[in-house]
């Protein structure tokens, strides 16, 4: 069994609790608590009187208001059944009622300043009012450390003066002297503070004077000043005005090194600042000296350099530089910035919005803004490609001059961003060769207008122009040795060209017949019989001559019932083979063959005479008889109108 607390201090009519720890280290033993001995004026109760171990029981002790003062004992027992296992004692002290005394200082005086090492006089007195004899003590603390403590046994009322002398520290600083008056409370055995008084004493030395002057700043501008005193390690901070002399008194008690520091930079605006020429001064001094310390500031202006347009390659020029007032600053930038696909050429320079020369040197008396304006150029790559068949080399002599025309537009060009460029894109012809535009590729917006390609160069890009090679084929068609009609055909080099003869050999009208007489060409060709088609292999310019014969059907309707045929027609000696029909005679006659037909004025028979009225050769009408000559240029019907006279 363990009791907490073992000693209880109480006053008459009081109440207290004692904690009883039962069976610590012993498990599951059923035990019972009882009071073996107590004063008769003590009443009690257990929170738990009987239980299995371990357990905690609170013993509440109540004292009669008539209990006499003195020391008494309460015995507590632990039982298992009828066996007393253990007993413990609580020491009970009955104390008279305690009335706190009245204690307060009536005087507490100390000097505000004192020199190092001297005695600090402390005058104090306190008054007391005490019902019965009480222990009183006064403590004097120097910076929270007890320097003096005096104890009294007092009762009744009265006043006690005190005087003390405390040795000041050997270095200058502020110290705090605190006086505390306390009384002892016998009920709980503690000292209780009634009142405390504190005074601050500044421990100083013989003053050492520093005269600080700050120049080069606007008048009355405040500057932060710090002074580090070595070896003391103390720091003094001040705000001083520019262009005035300021005195700073130091309390040092030995030769010292003073580090005097002012602000390294003072920034009044975004573009103006002041920089100390030497913001740190290290000075040796001895106590009592007077030292003058000057500081100077230089004015710096922010030179802001901006660039247009806002491109990464140009940002190397964008910077802000602090330049000392009155300095010279060259503003000449690179004339050209160039990457693989972009070029930027300097256009103009402005200072605070005013255009200046690019080789000007600025004298800095204000914060300028310099703007560099560059013009953006994009690289345009133009490629011309002539699609040649595998059988033809671009080194062929007959292509060299023509290729030079096509390639004259090829190359790399620097074009101002956004400009529209017109690139020749047309047919190039030399002798019997020509290059013909076929297609193009480009990452830019391009439009074809007439003989040129129009492109908007708003970024770096390319345009690839493709050409096909064509050669001229001269095709001549000779009709019946009468006329030859020539036409030119431009055919892609290396291709095949088909000539459909059935179109040429097809008659255009009834009474016409066309026959192929011969075909000549200096190009290789193949004749497809049955399809009446000729396939040319176009590997060079060439000539084709087609000779055809055109025949027209000539029909002669003679006067009937005559032994001789009239009208009668004759032609060249080789014109033979007239076919006789029932009432007409016909013959296929080569175009432009000359014929002569005889229309007789009168034909006499035995009993009949035939009289000529008019003759017809095709659409031509003859009103007179006789010989009529003409060329056969179309199908013809030849006939004669007549009048028959009979004789009886």
Image: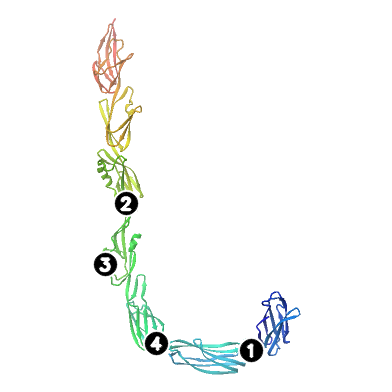
**Dot 3 surroundings within 10 Å: few (below 14), some, or many (20 or more)?**
some
Residue under circle 1? Answer: 98
Q: Nearer the viewer, mark 4 or mark 1?
A: 4
**Dot 2 surroundings within 10 Å: few (below 14), some, or many (20 or more)?**
many
- Dot 3 or dot 1: first in sequence order is 1
Q: Nearer the viewer, residue 511 or 138?
A: 138
The label shown at residue 530 is none
As measured in the structure, the alpha-carbon distance from the residue carrying label 2 to the one carrying label 4 is 80 Å
As measured in the structure, the alpha-carbon distance from the residue carrying label 3 to the one carrying label 1 is 95 Å
> Do tag 2 and tag 1 residues touch (Cβ < 8 Å)?
no
Q: Nearer the viewer, mark 3 or mark 1?
A: 1
The label shown at residue 252 is 4
Residue under circle 2? Answer: 380
- Dot 2 or dot 3: first in sequence order is 3
* Colour basis: rainbow
Helix, strand or loop for disc 3: strand
The label shown at residue 361 is 3
Q: Nearer the viewer, mark 2 or mark 4?
A: 4
Picture quadrant where residue 39 is located: bottom right
- Dot 4 or dot 1: first in sequence order is 1
The residue at the far right in this view is: 82
Q: Position of residue 646 (x, y in %)?
A: 29, 7
Picture quadrant where residue 244 is located: bottom left
Q: From where the camera sits, is residue 245 visible? A: no
Image quarter of the N terminus? bottom right
Q: Position of residue 230 (x, y in %)?
A: 39, 83
As measured in the structure, the alpha-carbon distance from the residue carrying label 2 to the one carrying label 3 is 37 Å
Helix, strand or loop for disc 2: strand
As measured in the structure, the alpha-carbon distance from the residue carrying label 4 to the one carrying label 3 is 54 Å
Q: Nearer the viewer, residue 213 or 204?
A: 204
Name which residue lies at 27% across and 39% down. Answer: 433
Q: Position of residue 566 (x, y in %)?
A: 27, 13
């Amino acid at each position: 069994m363990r009791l907490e607390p073992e000693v209880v201090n109480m006053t008459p009519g009081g109440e207290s609790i004692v904690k009883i720890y039962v069976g610590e280290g012993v498990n599951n033993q059923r035990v019972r608590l009882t009071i073996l001995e107590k004063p008769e004026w003590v009443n009690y109760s257990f929170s738990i009187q009987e239980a299995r171990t371990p357990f905690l029981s609170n013993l509440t002790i109540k004292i009669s208001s008539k209990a006499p003062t003195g020391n008494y004992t309460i015995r507590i027992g632990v039982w298992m059944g009828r066996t007393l296992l253990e007993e413990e004692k609580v020491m009970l002290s009955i104390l008279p009622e305690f009335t706190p005394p009245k204690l307060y200082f009536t005087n507490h005086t100390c000097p505000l300043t004192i020199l190092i090492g001297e005695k600090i006089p402390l005058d104090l007195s306190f008054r007391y009012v005490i019902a019965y004899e009480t222990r009183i003590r006064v403590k004097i603390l120097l910076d929270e450390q007890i320097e003096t403590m005096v104890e009294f046994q007092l009762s009744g009322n009265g006043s006690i003066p005190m005087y003390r002398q405390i040795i000041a520290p050997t270095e200058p600083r502020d110290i705090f002297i605190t006086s505390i008056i306390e009384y002892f409370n016998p009920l709980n055995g503690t000292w209780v503070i009634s009142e405390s008084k504190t005074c601050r004493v500044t421990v100083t030395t013989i003053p050492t004077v520093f005269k600080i002057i700050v120049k080069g700043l606007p008048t009355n501008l405040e500057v932060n000043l710090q002074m580090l005193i070595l070896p003391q390690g103390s720091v003094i901070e001040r705000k001083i005005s520019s262009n005035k002399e300021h005195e700073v008194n130091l309390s040092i008690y030995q030769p010292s090194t003073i580090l005097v520091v002012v602000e390294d930079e003072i920034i009044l605006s975004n573009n103006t600042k002041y920089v100390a020429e030497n913001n740190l001064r290290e000075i040796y001094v001895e106590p009592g000296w007077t030292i003058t310390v000057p500081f100077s500031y230089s004015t710096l202006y922010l030179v802001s350099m901006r660039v247009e347009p806002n491109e990464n390659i140009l940002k190397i020029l964008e910077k802000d530089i602090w330049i000392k007032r009155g300095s010279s600053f060259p503003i000449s930038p690179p004339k050209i910035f160039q990457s693989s696909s972009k070029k930027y050429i300097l256009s103009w320079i402005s200072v605070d919005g005013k255009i200046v020369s690019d080789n000007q040197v600025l004298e800095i008396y204000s914060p300028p803004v310099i703007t560099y304006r560059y013009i953006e150029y994009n690289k345009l790559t133009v490629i011309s490609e002539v699609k040649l068949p595998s059988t033809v080399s671009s080194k062929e002599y007959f292509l060299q001059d023509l290729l030079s025309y096509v390639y004259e537009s090829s190359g790399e060009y620097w074009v101002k961003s956004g400009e529209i460029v017109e690139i020749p894109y047309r047919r190039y012809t030399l002798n019997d060769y020509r290059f013909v535009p076929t297609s193009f590729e480009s990452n830019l917006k391009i439009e074809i207008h007439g003989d040129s390609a129009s492109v908007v160069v708003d970024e770096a890009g390319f345009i690839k122009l493709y050409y096909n090679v064509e050669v001229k084929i001269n095709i001549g068609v000779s009709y019946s040795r009468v006329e030859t009609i020539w036409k030119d055909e431009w055919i892609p080099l290396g291709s095949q060209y088909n000539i459909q003869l059935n179109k040429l050999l097809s008659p255009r009208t009834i009474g016409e017949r066309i026959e192929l007489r011969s075909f000549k060409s200096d190009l290789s060709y193949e004749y497809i019989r049955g399809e009446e088609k000729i396939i040319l292999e176009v590997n060079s310019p060439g000539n084709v001559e087609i000779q055809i014969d055109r025949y027209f059907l000539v029909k002669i309707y003679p006067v009937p019932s005559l032994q001789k045929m009239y009208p009668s027609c004759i032609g060249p000696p080789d014109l033979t083979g007239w076919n006789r029909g029932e009432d007409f005679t016909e013959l296929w006659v080569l175009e432009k063959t000359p014929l002569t037909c005889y229309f007789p004025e009168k034909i006499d028979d035995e009993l009949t005479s035939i009289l000529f009225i008019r003759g017809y050769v095709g659409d031509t009408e003859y009103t007179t008889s006789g010989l009529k000559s003409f060329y056969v240029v179309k199908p013809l019907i030849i006939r004669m109108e007549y009048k028959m006279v009979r004789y009886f």
